[in-house]
Image (cartoon, rainbow, N blue to C red):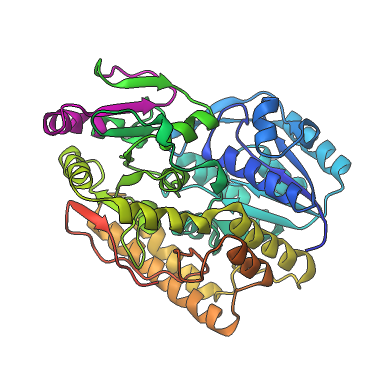
């Protein structure tokens, strides 16, 4: 792809670390290294050292202004929205003279939505959200549908995020996962401490969806079985913890890599509203065995031709304890090796090449106002009907789960037919595979529908294993 002027828009404050923020900065760094002119528009500022770690300069960022917190996706999102924000977006777009604008989370009432309205060049949109039921999203979705035709290509970071796009917008999006810089993560033997096993949790302490309460409920049983157990709970927020649990508070990116490289197990007890789980990928790349709840995106990450981690029923402290004890009691060396190898698929050399291929398609191909993936709109409409019905049934209802699985199967089957007619491999992606040392079958590839439908999980504890892709 020839050098282009690319504008990236992040709705959330860059001053607050988060998955979407890191994704945008990581993508900006990758595109800059590839020779593109890249600018980022987002609320907040970034410390120079952190910016340099992403390979970016201060003049590549434009601060969108002060933020306010709004309830969104089970959290409080720091966003900027209002007439002044729209004026700032217009100024940034005029000055940037971009060939393409890439907005993230356009469903949020934020500068991302304003950029979508104001852009007069091709627009790519990435959807990160995993909230099937949300009043905020419902309002934003109704407004966005008036301008949805401005989006030339839609990307979802997972099958879960894709379903949200289908449900709220009636469009399909191709699946490209979150990326990370794999070289930043790895085992840190020097940081490991002698004694009992060491496990870690990362996430906001006061955010219920992160599932810290589930982990705390499992600790008495775990400490009885392993008296020397060391537990690190890292993240911002306040929550009373046992005196023996280490709580360093919010940690920066280097400290996160150091922590993940020093633990035996990383525990992800999340109970809802996760669309991907990049921290699981970071833990796997760091040499930690992952024990995660069975939320669909986590199942997708840890499933493959071979076992990549341990899973348990979300919200069940006893099941979490069983999974951790199983992981501690068996030889994990081969599992850790496989999991580390699988993370090559998520390195920016691979994911970035696939994003660039989307840009190339948008900039050089004919514009076709459809569901963004070539799937028959009638198929997307049927899947949307099933997903909306599932949302009305309630997230935990068995009927809702069956409806979501049926919608996913419908989309996957249709996407598979499109893939058969027009292969999605590109020279850029093939080159990225080669540079990462990643054989085509070495790691799961969340792509345009090549996912088998997962059957019902009847066990409370499982090892993520054997699913055909």
Instruction: Return the residue found at the far bottom.
Output: 421
Identify which residue is drawn at 23% across, 51% down: 331
Question: How many numbered discs?
Answer: 0
In depth, the one of 380 and 235 nearer the eye is 235
Identify which residue is drawn at 52% across, 69% down: 448
Does residue 81 appear in this view? no
Q: Is residue 265 above or below residue 334?
A: above
Does residue 247 appear in this view? yes
Q: Is residue 227 magenta?
A: yes
**Viewport quadrant of the C terminus:** bottom left
Q: Is residue 416 above or below residue 257?
A: below
Q: Residue 13, how many percent across, how many down? A: 62, 30
Position of 20 with respect to 386 (left or right) is right
Q: Is residue 114 above or below residue 246?
A: below
- In the image, the segment drawn in magenta is 215-241
Identify which residue is drawn at 68% across, 56% down: 124
Position of 195 with respect to 284 (left or right) is left
């Amino acid at each position: 792809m020839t050098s282009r002027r690319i504008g990236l828009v992040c709705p959330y404050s860059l001053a607050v670390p988060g998955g979407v923020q890191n994704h945008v900065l990581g993508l900006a760094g990758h595109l800059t290294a590839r020779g593109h002119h890249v600018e980022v528009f987002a609320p907040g500022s970034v410390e120079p050292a952190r910016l340099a770690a992403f390979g970016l300069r201060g003049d590549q960022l434009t601060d969108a202004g002060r933020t306010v917190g709004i309830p969104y996706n089970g959290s409080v999102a720091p966003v900027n929205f209002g007439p002044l924000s729209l004026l700032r977006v217009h100024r940034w777009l005029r000055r940037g003279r971009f060939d393409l604008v890439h907005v993230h989370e356009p469903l949020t009432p934020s500068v991302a939505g304003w950029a979508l309205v104001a852009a007069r060049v091709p627009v790519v949109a990435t959807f990160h959200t995993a909230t099937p039921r949300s009043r905020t999203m419902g309002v934003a979705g109704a407004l966005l549908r008036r301008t949805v035709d401005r989006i030339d290509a839609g990307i979802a970071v997972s099958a879960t995020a894709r379903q949200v796009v289908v449900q709220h917008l009636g469009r399909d999006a191709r699946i490209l996962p979150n990326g990370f810089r794999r070289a930043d993560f790895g085992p840190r033997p020097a940081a490991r401490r002698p004694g009992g096993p060491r496990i870690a949790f990362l996430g906001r302490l006061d955010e219920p969806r992160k599932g810290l309460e589930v982990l705390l409920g499992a600790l008495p049983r775990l400490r009885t079985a392993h008296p020397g157990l060391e537990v690190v709970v890292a993240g911002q927020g306040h929550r009373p913890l046992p005196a023996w649990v280490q709580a360093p508070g919010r940690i920066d990116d280097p400290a996160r890599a150091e922590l993940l490289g020093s633990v035996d197990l990383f525990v992800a007890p999340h109970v809802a509203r996760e669309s991907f789980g990049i921290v699981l990928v970071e833990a796997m790349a760091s040499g930690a065995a992952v024990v995660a709840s069975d939320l669909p995106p986590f199942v997708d990450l840890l499933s493959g031709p071979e076992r990549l981690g341990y899973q348990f029923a979300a919200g069940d402290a006893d099941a979490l304890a069983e999974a951790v004890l199983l992981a501690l009691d068996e030889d994990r060396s081969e599992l850790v090796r496989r999991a580390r190898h699988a993370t090559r698929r998520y390195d920016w050399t691979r994911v970035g090449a696939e994003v660039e291929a989307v840009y190339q398609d948008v900039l050089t191909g004919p514009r076709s106002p459809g569901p963004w993936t070539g799937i028959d709109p009638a198929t997307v409409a049927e899947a949307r009907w099933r997903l909306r019905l599932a949302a009305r049934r309630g997230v935990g209802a068995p009927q809702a789960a069956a409806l979501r699985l049926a919608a996913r199967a419908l989309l996957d089957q249709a996407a598979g037919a499109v893939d058969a007619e027009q292969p999605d491999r590109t020279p850029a992606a093939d080159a990225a595979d080669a540079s990462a040392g990643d054989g085509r079958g070495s790691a799961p590839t969340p792509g345009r529908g090549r996912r088998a439908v997962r059957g019902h999980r009847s066990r409370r504890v499982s090892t993520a294993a054997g699913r055909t892709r």
